[in-house]
Image: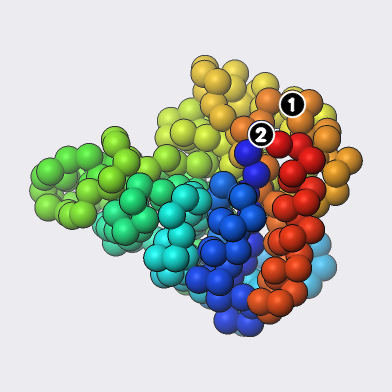
């Protein structure tokens, strides 16, 4: 099993350069970071985790800027979005950002995507929450066209552009892996676009059942990465009994000294299961 790190990078925690080095030095294979462009001051959508929305949601760095900084000081780890909110992103700009990250990292970009939960946030980007699934699918289709065609064009319900040139193209061929996040509502998206399912952490037995359903919908053996896993050896042991490719340990957002100490603990846990 592979082990990585998932976190929110903010202006109050460890810098992305220091974090990238620390993740690679401790033998993890990947770093996935979250995205929120902003948090509306007047909120209606309940936080899925319950209670008040944690401050880290208000302060996230742009994921592609942060991952590019980490790419500059690392050589091996995968650099992923966990997740990029494609329903809030222009597909032409996003295609260029992911391809640019893939180029400067030497082919280490992972495009983790999802539709999000914060309705007020997506509405500020002009997205209708009722149609966000169709919007996400169409933007992913358009992004793949931009990555793979010398002269790309797209004409859909939400995305529409005549033939364009867009460089750079990704280093990875045909394009960087797309990890589709979300629950059972995302299984059709996994089937259509997913090189992997990026599943939220949940009890291993429940996840095993969902993996079976996901693969039934997809009609193939889609790899699974589990996001935001706690550093409890008993929990890790349970995940080793089901078919997952990678666990992303959850790293709380902290200053550098506390982060490095926490990563040392997590690395010790991971070493038991390698």
Label 2 element class: loop
Q: Could you say which quadrant of the image residue 192 lies in?
A: top left
**Residue 8 in the image: x percent, y percent?**
62, 66
Is residue 174 visible in this depiction of the protein? Answer: yes
Dot in front, 2 or 1 = 2
Horizontal relation, residue 36 to residue 262: left or right: left
- Residue reaching furthest front? 25
Tell me the residue that label 2 is attached to.
Answer: 1
The residue lying toward the viewer, choosing from 97 and 261, is 261
Label 1 element class: loop
Indicate which disc residue 242 carries.
1
**Residue 58 in the image: x percent, y percent?**
61, 77
Horizontal relation, residue 268 to residue 9: left or right: right
Residue at 67% x, 65% y is 45
Residue at 60% x, 64% y is 22
Horizontal relation, residue 44 to residue 160: left or right: right
Mark 1 neighbour density, 10 Å: few (under 14) some (14–19) many (20 or more): some
The N terminus appears in which quarter of the rendering? top right
Residue at 82% x, 68% y is 51
Residue at 85% x, 44% y is 233
Q: Could you say which quadrant of the image residue 238 lies in?
A: top right
Horizontal relation, residue 20 to residue 135: left or right: right
Q: Is residue 141 above or below residue 45?
A: above
- Work out whether mark 2 precedes mark 1 in sequence or the reverse, and give the earlier one: 2
Mark 2 neighbour density, 10 Å: few (under 14) some (14–19) many (20 or more): few
Indicate which disc residue 56 carries.
none
**Residue 119 in the image: x percent, y percent?**
58, 63
Q: Give the Cα separation between the discs numbered 2 and 1.
A: 11 Å
């Amino acid at each position: 099993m592979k082990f990585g790190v998932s976190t929110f990078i903010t202006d109050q925690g460890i810098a992305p350069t220091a974090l990238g080095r620390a993740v690679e030095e401790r033998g993890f294979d990947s770093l996935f970071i979250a995205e929120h462009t902003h948090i509306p001051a007047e909120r209606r959508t309940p936080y899925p985790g319950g209670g008040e929305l944690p401050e880290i949601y208000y302060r996230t760095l742009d994921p592609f800027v942060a991952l590019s900084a980490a790419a500059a000081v690392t050589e091996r780890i995968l650099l992923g979005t966990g997740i990029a909110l494609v329903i809030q992103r222009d597909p032409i700009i996003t295609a260029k950002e992911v391809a640019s990250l893939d180029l400067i990292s030497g082919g280490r970009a992972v495009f983790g995507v999802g539709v999000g939960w914060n309705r007020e946030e997506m509405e500020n980007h002009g997205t209708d929450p009722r149609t966000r699934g169709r919007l996400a699918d169409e933007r992913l289709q358009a992004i793949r066209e931009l990555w793979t065609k010398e002269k790309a064009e797209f004409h859909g319900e939400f995305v529409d552009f005549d033939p364009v040139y867009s460089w750079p193209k990704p280093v990875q061929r045909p394009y960087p892996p797309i990890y589709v996040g979300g629950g059972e509502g995302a299984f059709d998206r996994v089937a259509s676009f997913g090189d992997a399912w990026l599943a939220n952490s949940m009890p291993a037995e429940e996840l095993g059942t969902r993996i079976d359903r996901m693969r039934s919908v997809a009609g193939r053996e889609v790899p699974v990465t589990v996001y935001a896993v706690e550093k409890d050896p008993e929990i890790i042991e349970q995940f080793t009994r089901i078919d997952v490719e990678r666990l992303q340990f959850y790293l709380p957002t902290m200053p550098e000294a506390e982060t490095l100490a926490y990563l040392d603990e997590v690395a010790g846990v991971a070493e038991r299961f390698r």
